[in-house]
Image (cartoon, helix red, strand yellow):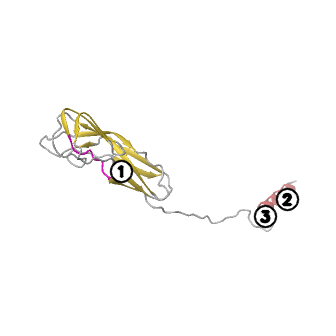
Amino acid sequence: MNQMKMAVHMSVLALAIGSNGLAIAASVPGTASATVVTPVTVSETTPLAFGAFAVGTTGGLLTIDPLGAHTAAPDITVINASTRSAATFTIDGEPNTVITVGLNGAGAQLDDGTAAGGGAPMALNGFTDSGLPVNTGAAGSVTFGVGATLNVNASQGVGSYSTATGDGQGYTITVNYN
């Protein structure tokens, strides 16, 4: 019986090795590829500009919508000859590629940069957009507008205010490929 068991084991071993004594395993080299695309960029083509205005003793709100129209209330007098504009941004990248666009206005404010207690900073909030793009389009370039509300303090100090002076702080636009 031991010879019989041994013969069966030899037969199984012969099947596992193959009829020509070759193993049953195989191998093939793997392949790989990559595509480098145009990096996505975003640039401000027109800054958000609230123009010139006068403020009374109660202050108020000056709003620029994403298309550039403005409203002012209650104690703000807009100077008509002044230049006002919504911000515009251009995104460039790989054509027809899905993107995500974020707008963060947390903490944004304008300041006049005076250290001697000139005008107090004015907060920016209520940001709106003309429709954040979801892809780069056939040309690989899309543009959109941004508006916001400027909170003008009562008896705001006279001067030029900016996000780039003193305690001014800008808002951010972030773009990523999906």
| Disc marking residue 88 | 1
Residue at the disc numbered 3: 18
In the displayed orientation, state which residue is furthest to the front. Answer: 80
Q: Residue at x 18, y 37 (%)?
A: 156
Left or right for 89, reference 30: left
How far is the residue under mark 3 from the one under mark 2? 16 Å
How far is the residue under mark 1 from the one under mark 2? 85 Å
Q: Which comes before the other along the chain, label 3 or label 2?
A: 2
Residue at the disc numbered 2: 7
Residue 170 pos. (x, y %): 29, 46
Q: Name the one closer to the observer, 14 or 7.
A: 14
Which label sits in the foreground, 1 or 3?
1
> Is residue 50 found inside the magenta-colored segment of the image?
yes
How far is the residue under mark 1 from the one under mark 3? 72 Å
Residue 27 pos. (x, y %): 67, 64
Which label sits in the foreground, 1 or 2?
1
Q: Are marks 3 and 2 in contact (CB under 8 Å)?
A: no
Name the kind of residue labelled 2 in the image.
Ala
Name the kind of residue labelled 1 in the image.
Thr
Q: Which comes before the other along the chain, label 1 or label 3?
A: 3
Left or right for 24, reference 60: right
Element type where label 1 sits in the image = strand
Residue 167 pos. (x, y %): 22, 44
Magenta stretch in the rendered image: 46-53
